[in-house]
Image (cartoon, rainbow, N blue to C red):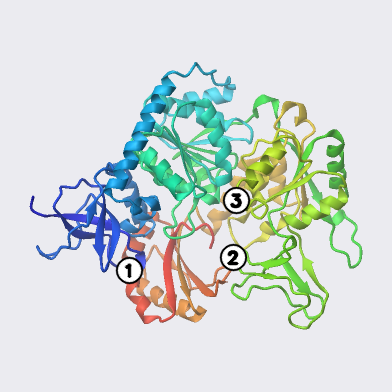
Amino acid sequence: MSAPTRVAVAVETPQHAGLGDLLDYESTLTLAPGTLVRAPLGRREVPGLVWHRASARAAEAGQLRPLVEALVSLPPLDGAWRRLVDFAAAYYQRSTGELALSVLPPELRKLDERQLARRIARLQREAQEAAAARANLPGVAGAPALSEEQAAALAEFGADPRPTLLHGVTGSGKTEVYLNAAARALEAGRQALVLVPEINLTPQLEARFAARFPGRCLASLHSALTPAQRLRHWLLAHLGLADLILGTRLAVFASLPRLGLVVVDEEHDPSFKQQEGARYSARDLAVWRARDAKIPVLLGSATPSLETWQRVQEGRYRQLVLSARIGGGALPRVRVFDMAQVPKQAGAPAPALAPPLLQALRDRLERGEQSLLLLNRRGYAPVLECGACGWKSGCPHCSAWRVFHKADRSLRCHHCGFSERVPRACPECGNLDIAPVGRGTEKLEEQLGVLLPGARIARIDADSTRVRGALEARLAAVHAGEVDVLVGTQMVAKGHDFRRITLVAAVNPDAALFANDFRAPERLFALLMQAAGRAGRSAEQAARSEMWIQTGHPRHALFAALAAGDFAAFAASQLAERRSAGLPPFSHLALLRADAKSAAVASAFLAEAAELAGEEPAITVYAPVPPAVAKVADVERMQMLVESVSRPALQRFLGAWLPQLHGLRARHRGLLRWAVDVDPLTI
């Protein structure tokens, strides 16, 4: 047996443990970097990865603990993957092992060497059989003819090493460009990675890719998969057996030995930002990964993020434009309706729909056309209120209201999940007159049933699609023409090709106009433009298609830009405001968050952390403040903003500052956890 050698292993240790990035072990085998191992840590055995650099903490010979097992049947995770993890861990201020192990399939850690070897052998055998079957497939019909803009975009894509923004209006055929770009990668023997923001967009995209590339191995990576499915698809990608990999943000960490193309669809979507653990941006990591691998990356959107748009203006990204809808479709005409014109009855709530909009819905019903009503608030009503004493249905565990869900007569907190039956009387004064205030999708669906008798109405939101397969069934009904009016949240506003919809209406979009979040106008504009894109997608209906916006602020500049279809003007005005205010992308932010049993403990921790920060000329550390929802599940939350005009300066500061905070936790009894969020989406 050979003499034991020292290996540096990345193990899954949380940030607050303060153990460092890598730990030293001894091994009787010569293990390549990227090999999956099992290692002792305290009294436990934990998964680990042999890393590519020496441990920073040396140990005397004979004092190292031996590895328990090495899973040598699994090909090592290559240098490109480890560089991605190294960069992400450093940039988002997490430990290497914590990030590396968290992005691997959980089932992988449950298998021993023999079990894993059997799984790999079976997948390789199945892949050989599939390749043989593919060779006998008859010829497949060619791809549809490209428009002039699509052909020009494809001709230019890849000729420039810069990341490429594919700025295309909704329905302009961005997916067809993705398919053709993927075909190039496959022809070169490479893999293509396609990221989408939400799970509900993956089935239709999978169907498009499967139809275009029959017989090719396609792997999906998203949280709706079972653990066994996720492991299978991850292994297909890692072993190089899958040619096409589609997934949500976690898929950016897929191990891909033949990666030749990265696509990020709807690159502006906030869902690409992880909100727990290592708070990474999959879009930004996709750009970094492509640049590191020297392969093309394509960012697609009708409403690019302002960060991406600014990089285009600076020449750091290249822009390709698809300005026209394919197939003769056209963007709907935008009508902004002033709700102040609707007569109000004393003591009566405002009507759900303005009379002209209601008539427009009836016109569509008479013509056999479909309509979509967008209300980005699920439930029946956001709160119940007592008319006598003013009691409201607050959550006892969160600083938020419990939402009234009429279908099951429950009050449910959308933050912690706490749910109770609706009380028969006010808990405070016993008054029987407690009533819903405001409107959610459930109530709008009910009101439409009264206003449009005989209409076939369907609702798509997180509540109506909770059961497995419900979303697919409801979307199929819409596509089959079995629905007259579709009510939904942002789930239905993007990515869906509804050919019969000629009317889209935003019922209550005003809340985002004056929100504290500086990104709220950007998100609202994107949501409304995406929603508008569901109408007018066929040539025969384009002329009749409309987008209605019910608002109390009809002269707002955001609605004017939307009506003109002028994203460039909207982006220019928003960027000018952000430049003058010193907000991203003209500054760089990090949030230090603290969770504790009391707000005082969290504030004290952050105050002491601020003292440790000292005075840095390029860094501003603001006072601790509570977030918009300060308490969730009986945990009080506080946060402290760190700002700099220089990204490198912010990174250097965080790298020196955060290690000092590990010792603070013991001095603040009741502090549950702390974490840093680099490039936060909300402040």
Q: What is the secondary structure assignment of the residue under circle 3?
A: helix
**Rendering quarter of residue 436:** bottom right
* Residue position for label 1: 17
Q: Position of residue 287 (x, y in %)?
A: 42, 42
The one of 534 and 369 positioned closer to us in this rendering: 369
Compare residues 288 and 2 and report the one nearer the observer.
2
* Other residues around mark 1 within 10 Å, as few (<14) / some (14–19) / many (≥20): few
Residue 531, given in percent of the width and then of the height, sits at 68, 43
Q: Quadrant of residue 403?
A: bottom right
User: Which element type, helix, strand or loop, lies under badge 1?
Assistant: helix
Is 263 left or right of 512, judged from the image as shown? left
Q: Are marks 1 and 3 in contact (CB under 8 Å)?
A: no
Task: Kindly state the secondary structure of the residue where label 2 is placed.
Answer: loop
Q: Earlier in the sequence, mark 2 or mark 3?
A: 2
Q: Amino acid at mark 3?
A: Gln
Give the residue at x 80% y 33%: 544
Give coordinates of residue 430: x percent, y percent: 79, 82
In the picture, the disc for residue 415 is: 2
Q: Earlier in the sequence, mark 1 or mark 2?
A: 1
> Is residue 618 left or right of 508 when viewed as pictured?
left
Q: Inspect the image, locate mark 1, and give the three-letter code of the amino acid beneath it.
A: Ala
**Residue 8 visible here:** yes
Dot 2: few (<14), some (14–19), or many (≥20) neighbours within 10 Å? Answer: some
Residue 642 placement: quadrant: bottom left
Tags 1 and 2 touching, CB below 8 Å:
no
Mark whose residue sits in front, 1 or 3: 1
Horizontal relation, residue 184 to residue 383: left or right: left
Label 1 and label 3: CA atoms lie apart by 41 Å
Image point 28% across, 60% down: which residue? 21
Q: Where residue 363 is drawn, which disc sits there?
A: none
Q: Position of residue 553 (x, y in %)?
A: 76, 55
Which residue position holds label 3? 574
